Amino acid sequence: MSYYRSSSEHIASGLFLLLASLVVPAIVVVKSVLFNQNCGGYLKQAADANTVELALDRVDRALEYIESKDLTHGYTSVLWRTEDENIGYWYENIKACRSELEANVDASSLEKSNVLMKVRESLTDNGEKGTELTIPPGISRYPDNLVYGIMLWISVILFVAAFIQFEKA
């Protein structure tokens, strides 16, 4: 006996697969937004700050998040390690910026200006889109980068399967 699926069953299974394929990318986007709200945004403001006190406040807020999420060591890479994915170096660099800022709270205007430029240079890079924060790629998903990578591939497969079901309808 052969089983025949109706057009509406194909559409229903296609919709289910399509929705299932969007769950993981949605989670990745939410994690990225949360990281930017709780850390990246503060680092950007520290880099843009006009006073040492304001930069110090913003770096402290970012460090509070970094330390609460244990983003102090390791690599964000899955297959091989590259230094742009070195979380320990990134964390130590931010702590060094904080120390420089703290040491210059009572400094002269020229020294404050110099330390603010140094902090800006330490926290940002000139990228294709202009000035960008220096942040290890994939840090918002750390330490589960491999799991999210696998789940994203599964999402792609589900997405393709959804359109195969729509074609059968």
Image (tube, rainbow, N blue to C red):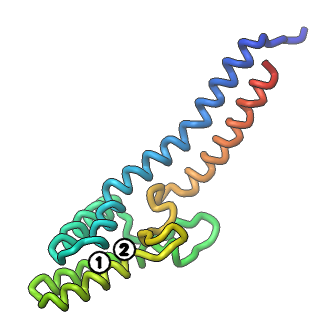
- Look at 48% across and 43% down and name the residue there: 27
- Kindly check if marks 1 and 2 are in contact, taking CB atoms under 8 A apart as contact: yes
Q: Looking at the image, is 142 positioned above or below residue 95?
A: above
Does 91 appear above or below 41?
A: below
Within-10-Å neighbours for mark 1: few <14, some 14–19, many 20+: some
Q: Is residue 76 left or right of residue 115?
A: right
Q: Of residues 163 and 149, which is closer to you in this image? A: 163
Left or right of 39: which side holds 159? right
Name the residue located 69 percent from the left edge and 24 percent from the top edge: 14
Residue 104 location, quadrant:
bottom left
Find residue 58 and report its horizontal and vertical position in percent: 23, 66
To which residue does mark 2 refer? Answer: 91
Please provide percent x and percent y for residue 73.
42, 71
- Which quadrant is the N terminus positioned in? top right
Q: CA distance from mark 1 to mark 2?
A: 6 Å
Local secondary structure at mark 1:
helix
**Residue 95: x and y, percent?**
29, 77
- Amino acid type for the residue under numbered disc 2: Tyr
Indicate which disc residue 2 carries.
none
Q: Residue furthest right?
A: 1
Q: Residue at x 12, y 89 (%)?
A: 107
Q: Tell me if 35 is positioned left or right of 158 in this view.
A: left
Q: Which residue is mark 1?
A: 95
